[in-house]
Amino acid sequence: MKKLLYLLLVLNLFSCSSSGDNTDDTLSPIEHMEKAYVYCTDGIGTGPSPQDYYEFTYENGSLTKIKGRFYPVFMQMFDKFFSEPITKLTYSGNTVTVSEFELGTIPGYDEYRYTMNNNRPVKQENYYINNSTGASTLSFARTYTYEQDKLKSVHLVFPGPGNYEYFTTYYYDNSNNLTKSEFLERINGVDNKMTTAIYSDFDNAANPFKKLYLINDTFFEKSLSVNNFRKKETTVVNLVLNIPPKTSTKTWNYKYDANGQVLLYFPF
């Protein structure tokens, strides 16, 4: 259940509060970011905390391990970050497997299997791996569609009762920065809810999330642009009930180095 709730928050992700339109799609991402504060990446909290950061490990230029993960906490409004859990990425042909290993006596873990084409995901499947009995049946699946070398849509399906489906459509400007996304929830064939996000206040820095996009939905969303949006306005419309739309705004206050590149980890 915690994984289901996490995944359904894809367009209600938290953020850290000028823009320029002279961007270049050849900007290089940070090659080997070793650490990144949670506040600067996921945007949780009111400022960087010295103990709350991800650690990244690479082999031959590919990300292979992440230390740190969020978990929902009972009766808490937000998820809590724990610094010890390990996530590993393994590569085999056109498949990348992301394994979220658990601590202590938990008898299994979640595994995300990506089918890749030209270093881009075209399909994702999620299974729960029991340490004793092996993989469960399919928990959910995503398919990715591209147009003109950019991600155009994602279709997320949860098999089983309710026939839950989610459709995300992405829109870009002439600088290849993400400007809008539309997230449609459909239950038993009926459109239930539409969430629209508007992205703005882009900087001119290279995108440091380009190599981190398989870690979680927040990083994936941020990786889609050439530069970095610093404002996200989200509006949720219920398509079934006659209730007012809900609107929220998130902003990022990134730090930059002397060359104008984003700093996700820095000394206090």
Image (tube, helix red, strand yellow):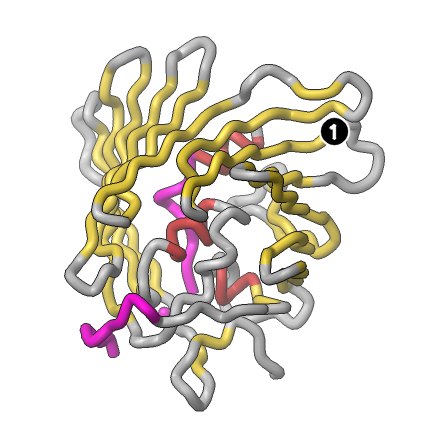
Which amino acid type is marked by label 1?
A: Gly
Measuring from the top left, give residue 3's x and y in whole percent: 55, 32
In terms of image quadrants, where is residue 27? bottom left
Number of residues whose C-alpha sits closer than 10 Å to that of mark 1, classed few (under 14), some (14–19) or many (20 or more): some
Residue nearest the viewer, comparing 30 with 215: 30
Q: Quadrant of the N terminus?
A: top right
Measuring from the top left, give residue 241's x and y in whole percent: 21, 23
Q: Quadrant of the C terminus?
A: bottom right
Furthest toward the front, the residue is: 93
Question: What's the magenta region?
Answer: 8-26
Residue at the (30%, 27%) spot, across then down: 185
Q: In the picture provided, is 165 more to the left or to the right than 208?
A: left
Residue at the (49%, 76%) spot, across then down: 263
Measuring from the top left, give residue 227's x and y in whole percent: 32, 67
Furthest toward the bottom, the residue is: 258
What residue is pinned by disc 1? 108
Measuring from the top left, give residue 120's x and y in whole percent: 42, 45
Residue at the (43%, 50%) spot, across then down: 220
